Amino acid sequence: MQTLYKPRFILKALFMAVFLLSLQACEEFEYSPYEVRLDKDEKNINQRNIGKIQALPLSPTDTLRFILTADSQGFYEENSELVQQINKNEKAAFLLLGGDVTDFGLAKEFKLVHDDLKRLKMPYVAVVGNHDVVNNGKEVFQAMYGKFDISFTVGRNKFILLNTNYLEFAKTVPDLDWLENELKASADFDNVFVLSHIPPKNTEFGREKAVRYIQLMSQYNVRFSLHGHNHSFDYYFPFDGKVPYLESGATEKKEYVVFTVIGQNVTFKRVKF
């Protein structure tokens, strides 16, 4: 009788072994490239880092330095080198990432870039790019970074991050009513910086949106309109010539921009490595 049950026990033991291995494997492998499974430090990155920035012991009269880079999409080796370069050579309060964190909007890509940028000796804040919202990227970006349109203040400086991915949001963005309300509330600040991925000179910004955006920049005396998207550094005074526009090179170009703010005096340097 015992020999009749032995094979059954062996099969049961094998089944349990396979089941336990599968439980271990599910922690190591993705079920799908589109799943959004995040660790604690990969959630709500922007708001958490803004909290760190605002907790810095900076008085309104202190010199403020911040760094701008953009388009880290798929340039993992260069991203790692960028972090090493900045950690070794720069003392700044924070870094702004001007969109296109990823190429295909997949959680794995976002995680890989964050794995590098979280090693910075300073917090970083990212604006959404057009590549970040393909596939299920909208869901991933919101889970990892939070709202598409946000603002924060440091001393007497205000930073506004604006979603300008016109085509990927069915021509409903940028939300210029929200932007104008943010600008109206900025009258008491020495400097206002607006960061978005796509600059208004590109057709992907939306022709009809670009006209009003440009007017708002001049009307409210924005200090800088900052962008990524075109992968090359550019600095220009378009349209009415009142507001400087600056586009950061992609991280693959091994460069970034350091801004120095002293009261209402704002200067920048382009760093190549």
Image: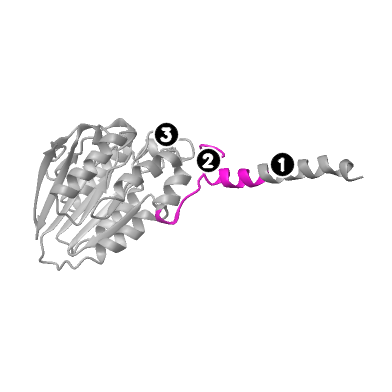
| Category of crowding for the residue at label 2, using alpha-carbon neighbours closer than 10 angstroms: few (below 14), some (14–19), many (at least 20) | few
- Tell me, yes or no, if residue 138 can be seen here: yes
On the rendered structure, is 221 left or right of 128? Answer: left
User: Who is closer to the viewer here, 94 or 84?
Assistant: 84
From this view, report whether residue 49 is shown above or below residue 85. below
On the rendered structure, is 68 left or right of 11? Answer: left
**Kind of residue sitting beneath label 3:** Phe
Foreground disc of the pair 2, 3: 2
Residue at the image position 53 percent from the left and 40 percent from the top: 30
Q: Earlier in the sequence, mark 2 or mark 3?
A: 2
Q: The magenta stretch spans which residues? A: 19-41
Measuring from the top left, give residue 264's x and y in whole percent. 9, 58
User: Who is closer to the viewer here, 252 or 66?
Assistant: 252
In the picture of the structure, the residue carrying the numbered disc 3 is 104
Task: Give the alpha-carbon distance from disc 3 to disc 1, as whole Å.
Answer: 40 Å
Q: Earlier in the sequence, mark 3 or mark 1?
A: 1
Q: Give the position of the C terminus as an image quadrant.
A: top left
Q: Are marks 1 and 2 in contact (CB under 8 Å)?
A: no
**Kind of residue sitting beneath label 2:** Phe
Foreground disc of the pair 3, 1: 1
Secondary structure, mark 2, is loop
In the picture of the structure, the residue carrying the numbered disc 1 is 14
- Tell me, yes or no, if residue 218 can be seen here: no
| Tag shown at residue 29 | 2
User: Who is closer to the viewer here, 136 or 78?
Assistant: 78
Measuring from the top left, give residue 103's x and y in whole percent. 38, 33
Which residue occupies the extreme front position in the image? Answer: 2
Q: Earlier in the sequence, mark 1 or mark 2?
A: 1
